Amino acid sequence: MFDFSLAQLSTDQFSIVHLSLFSLTLCVLVALSLDKIVGEAERFHPLVGFGNMAKRVEAALNKGSYLKLKGLLALFLCIAPISVLGYVISLWLSDDLLAEIIFSSFILYVAIGWRSLIEHARAVYETLEKPDISLAREAVSRIVSRDCDELNETEVAVAATESVLENGADAIFAAIFWFMIAGVPGVICYRLANTLDAMWGYKNDRFLKFGWAAARFDDALNYFPARLTALSYALTGHTRNALNCWLKQARIWKSPNAGPVMAAGAGAIQTSLGGKAIYHGTTHLRPLLGLRLSKSTRASAKSIKTACQLVNKSVLLWLVILVSSALISEPQAAVNFIESSVELARNWFGQWF
């Protein structure tokens, strides 16, 4: 039905990625469109089931001695079988290009959280604009792990803006990056590792040793995507400020990946982030990121909204680059796809043509 010609499978049937650049880009477009139109599944989301399984694995292994080794084993048990299953299904579908594109698009759609990120952020800045600090605290508590009960308006805005910038990297760009690099198994591996880091990556008595492997693995997987995200923020925002903040401030942030993303993002939207934050009752005095703190750079509802716009513009930038690269490298595939799409439309809606 679909003849992409140059977009057909690679000659090595056992390579990790079976799809060409054109087909991978098409999957990204479909996945982002699904996420934008449908959003996250409210019921039966695969990551919810995965989280429940991970809790049982952690309960069984996170005790006694050799906790780092057990954490590494838990990481492998949770990620490897599902990633291999994704690869096997992709390989099984490799003779049917349309079926593999549909499957791959769905997996990427599940791994992306673009619309939900923007919607959660919108709930925060809309309550700040009313203003209703109680509702704002409740809204921001859904997207951050810090204690929110005593936050003032500026601190709510700081927390939400940081979350938008950092989760733009984690929930959108890193997923796309690993999908383009390693296809379905790559994006599955990344999303599950990122979920385990969110569950086990705390530096408290319970997870300091057991969660070490998950945290380090997530750091490794996010290294390049985080810096590409920071560059995207710089290119789609105030470039000079973003690059300056990235180069001078990223290294003083405790997270090797959040530092570049949030420093560049803060500079790009010309605001000030960082500062005091309370986690599990303990106050952390974090370095300031972005511009020098002043009345004009203080985080507010506007900074949350601007951060959302920055993420959206960066998504558009990635799409322009991917689509342009696909068309340049495989122009005949685009022609064949258009012709096949028209033929399919005629078959489905022939009476209208």
Image (cartoon, rainbow, N blue to C red):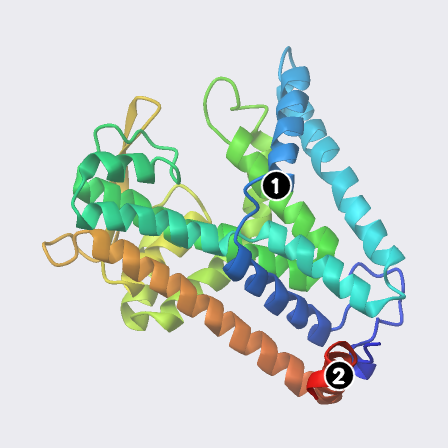
Q: Residue at x 54, y 73 (%)?
A: 319
Mark 1 closeness class: few <14, some 14–19, many ≥20 residues within 10 Å: few
Image quadrant holding the N terminus, namely bottom right
Q: Earlier in the sequence, mark 1 or mark 2?
A: 1
Query: Mark number for residue 45?
Result: 1
- Image quadrant in which you'd find residue 155: top left
Image quadrant holding the C terminus, namely bottom right
Could you say which is closer to the camera, residue 24 or residue 343? 343
- Image quadrant in which you'd find residue 127: top left
Q: Is label 1 in a helix, a strand or a loop?
A: loop
Amino acid, disc 2: Gly
Count of labels in the image:
2
Q: Residue at x 39, y 65 (%)?
A: 233
In the picture provided, is 297 more to the left or to the right than 334?
Answer: left
Q: Residue at x 56, y 53 (%)?
A: 112
Mark 2 closeness class: few <14, some 14–19, many ≥20 residues within 10 Å: few
Residue 72 place in picture, x, y as percent: 68, 30
In the picture provided, is 340 more to the left or to the right than 133?
Answer: right
Q: Is residue 18 visible?
A: no
- Asked if marks 1 and 2 touch (Cβ < 8 Å), the reply is no
Residue 57 place in picture, x, y as percent: 68, 23
Q: Is residue 301 visible?
A: yes
Residue placed under numbered mark 2 in the picture:
350
From what the image shows, is residue 61 above or below residue 28? above
Q: Single out the mark in the foreground, 1 or 2.
A: 2
From what the image shows, is residue 263 above or below residue 28? above
Residue 220 place in picture, x, y as percent: 58, 47
In the picture provided, is 322 more to the left or to the right than 227?
Answer: right
Residue 283 place in picture, x, y as percent: 27, 27
Amino acid, disc 1: His
